[in-house]
């Protein structure tokens, strides 16, 4: 029986519940009831692309562990909204943090939900400005679960309107403007791109291919898709990766109060390691 009329594909409440469970188990994304239409519209494209006639059959394909379809399924259900220098105050603080660290040793940053790349490239531009050098002692690992956004991020090519709100001098310094068939596009300068390495990481995984000794983790506007238990699990895994003075940058509507004991608010959605965490006797970064 059809749950809604005039649909191209049958989409029952049971289908939605199953999809909801699958994406929650795989990516931690907790879809509310209000996302039902969105799910229908995004996954209808997968049904058309695979030539499958019903959601029930599509679910059978997923449940047969078809790796390529799992990737496309996950990519379809993520929300990738981002922008250059989004939440600008974080980049002011990052610049101060980098200047305070200086060039005594290499600095490592992780952007843990990098989407199409605007966020890690903004971190790289901040590092270049902070050290007044196109070769700052900074490396940035940028990751996301979504392989499609990572491909866009690696290319570093964006529509001109993405940089419209940025200062013209900054755009001239860090972007190349497209001409002829590339007009209306900008490309990140290779000197900026060089600082960023992209890789796929699912934050829900128990282990990540990310080395410790990080000075900052940007984890912005992704935790909102997870429930508190999932957030806590991720934050517990992030804490040991930070240097003892490292900072965790969160999104504007996210708070990690439930992770006290691991993280402590430093101000305006920026967290530092909780002294209680650093004092743990077995913690490798303990200060005493
Ligand atoms: C709204 S975007 C935020 C982008 C950027 N951090 C910002 O604040 O502008 C959320 C990103 O989180 C990613 N994401 C969702 N679930 C994830 C998971 N389990 N592991 C890693 N990334 C995930 C999505 O693919 C998406 O690109």
Image (cartoon, rainbow, N blue to C red):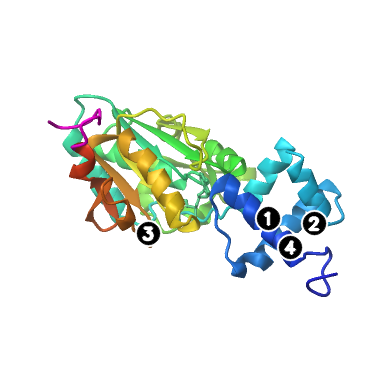
278 part of magenta stretch:
no
Gap in angstroms between the C-alphas marked 4 and 1: 9 Å
Q: Which numbered marker is on residue 254?
A: 3
Q: Which numbered marker is on residue 19?
A: 1
Q: Position of residue 68 (x, y in %)?
A: 72, 37
The residue lying toward the viewer, choosing from 130 and 185, is: 130
Left or right relative to 238: residue 189: right
What segment is highlighted magenta in the picture?
279-288
Q: Earlier in the sequence, mark 2 or mark 3?
A: 2
Gap in angstroms between the C-alphas marked 2 and 3: 34 Å
Q: Is mark 3 within 8 Å of ligand 1?
A: no
Q: Are marks 1 and 2 in contact (CB under 8 Å)?
A: yes
Q: Which numbered marker is on residue 55?
A: 2
Crowding around mark 3 (Cα neighbors within 10 Å: few <14, some 14 to 19, many 20+) is some
Q: Which residue does the numbered mark 4 point to in the structure image?
A: 14
Gap in angstroms between the C-alphas marked 3 and 4: 31 Å
Q: Earlier in the sequence, mark 2 or mark 4?
A: 4
The residue lying toward the viewer, choosing from 57 and 162, is: 57
Q: Residue furthest left?
A: 288
Q: Quadrant of the N terminus?
A: bottom right
Residue 104 in view of the camera: yes
**Residue at screen point 37% across, 45% down:** 235
Gap in angstroms between the C-alphas marked 1 and 2: 10 Å
């Amino acid at each position: 029986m059809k749950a809604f009329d005039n649909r191209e594909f049958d989409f029952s409440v049971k289908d939605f519940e199953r999809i909801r469970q699958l994406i929650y188990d795989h990516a931690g994304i907790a879809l509310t009831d209000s996302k039902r239409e969105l799910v229908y519209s995004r996954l209808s494209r997968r049904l058309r692309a695979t030539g499958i006639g019903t959601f029930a059959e599509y679910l059978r394909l997923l449940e047969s562990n078809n790796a390529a379809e799992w990737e496309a399924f996950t990519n379809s259900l993520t929300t990738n909204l981002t922008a250059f220098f989004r939440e600008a105050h974080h980049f002011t603080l990052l610049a101060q943090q980098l200047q305070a660290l200086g060039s005594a040793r290499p600095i490592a940053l992780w952007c843990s939900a990098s989407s199409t790349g605007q966020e890690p490239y903004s971190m790289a531009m901040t590092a270049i400005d902070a050290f007044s050098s196109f070769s700052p002692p900074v490396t940035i690992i940028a990751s996301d679960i979504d392989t499609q956004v990572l491909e866009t991020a690696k290319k570093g090519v964006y529509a001109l309107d993405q940089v419209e709100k940025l200062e013209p001098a900054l755009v001239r310094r860090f972007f190349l403007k497209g001409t002829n068939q590339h007009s209306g596009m900008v490309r990140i300068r290779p000197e900026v791109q060089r600082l960023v390495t992209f890789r796929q990481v699912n934050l829900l995984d128990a282990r990540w291919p990310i080395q410790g000794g990080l000075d900052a983790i940007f984890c912005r506007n992704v935790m909102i898709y997870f429930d508190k238990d999932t957030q806590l699990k991720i934050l517990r895994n992030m804490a040991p990766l930070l240097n003892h003075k490292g900072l965790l940058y969160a999104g504007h509507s996210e708070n990690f109060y439930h992770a006290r004991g691991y993280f402590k608010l430093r101000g305006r959605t920026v967290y530092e390691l909780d002294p209680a965490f650093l004092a743990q006797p077995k913690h490798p970064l303990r200060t005493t």
